[in-house]
Image (cartoon, grey):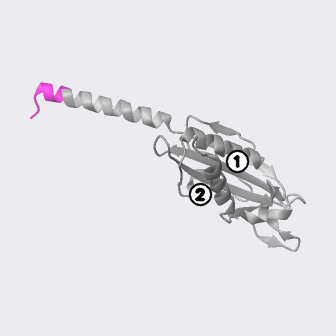
Amino acid sequence: MMTPCRALAALAACATLSAAAARDVSAQASPIRVRVPGNLRPMLIDSVATAAVSVPASPALTYGAAAAVLQELKVPLSVNEPQNGVLGSDGFTMMRLLGRVRLSQYLSCGSGMSGEYADVRRITMALIVWVDSAGPAESRVRVGMLAGAQDLSGVSRNAVLCGSTGALESFITDEIRKRAVMP
């Protein structure tokens, strides 16, 4: 049996822990659901994100480097939340190239008589980068990408979901590590 003082102390400790947990949950970014051609249901893009890669730079510097890499690739930044360490696009379309590289280097969408679908069809892609703190001078970066390919001749052919070759995610993390250099 607890004494009234112990019960009051336990209640205060629970209230303090609950308040701290509520602050932690409210600071987290909500999951990003995207829908791409070839998939009828929205998907959580963080479910396909890469394993965290360590970057020897502050989260702010890493976030800035990630923004520069995505802008160089001409990815429109529809998601830009520095407070949550999330940036990228929840859906944009392109054809043939991303940056200066053929899309078939980054995506596996199948092929037909006209070539790789990634190079000859309209691609809708969602690309998100997460930057987490691993200390004052170290960050962790994850990259998530979902894409689908749609035939340009109309709706007579079904859209297909594209898989990643892993090259885009590797390119982005490598470029972030090169650019996020501590002074």
Please tell me the numbered disc located at residue 124: none
Residue identifier under label 1? 69
- SS at badge 1: helix
Q: Which residues are magenta?
A: 1-8
Locate residue 178 relative to residue 155 in the image: left or right: left
Answer whether residue 136 is magenta in the image: no
Query: How many residues crowd around disc 2 within 10 Å: few (fewer than 14), some, or many (20 or more)?
Result: some
State the predominant SS element of the stretch in magenta: helix
- Using the rendered view, name the quadrant where residue 116 is placed: bottom right
Residue 149 in percent (x, y) is at: 78, 60
Residue identifier under label 2? 48
Residue 120 in percent (x, y) is at: 86, 63
Looking at the image, which residue is at 43% across and 32% down?
23
Task: Give 39 or 171, whichever is nearer the viewer.
Answer: 171
- Using the rendered view, name the quadrant where residue 71 is placed: top right
Q: Number of callouts in the render?
A: 2
Q: Which badge, 1 or 2, is on the more N-terminal residue?
A: 2
Task: Give 112 or 133, whichever is nearer the viewer.
Answer: 133
Find the distance from the CA under tag 1 to the CA under tag 2. Answer: 20 Å
Task: Give 176 or 121, whichever is nearer the viewer.
Answer: 176
Task: Give 43 or 108, whichever is nearer the viewer.
Answer: 108
In the current view of this chain or complex, which residue is farthest to the right? Answer: 153
In the current view of this chain or complex, which residue is farthest to the bottom? Answer: 113
Locate residue 60 relative to residue 93 in the image: left or right: left
Residue 158 in percent (x, y) is at: 79, 63
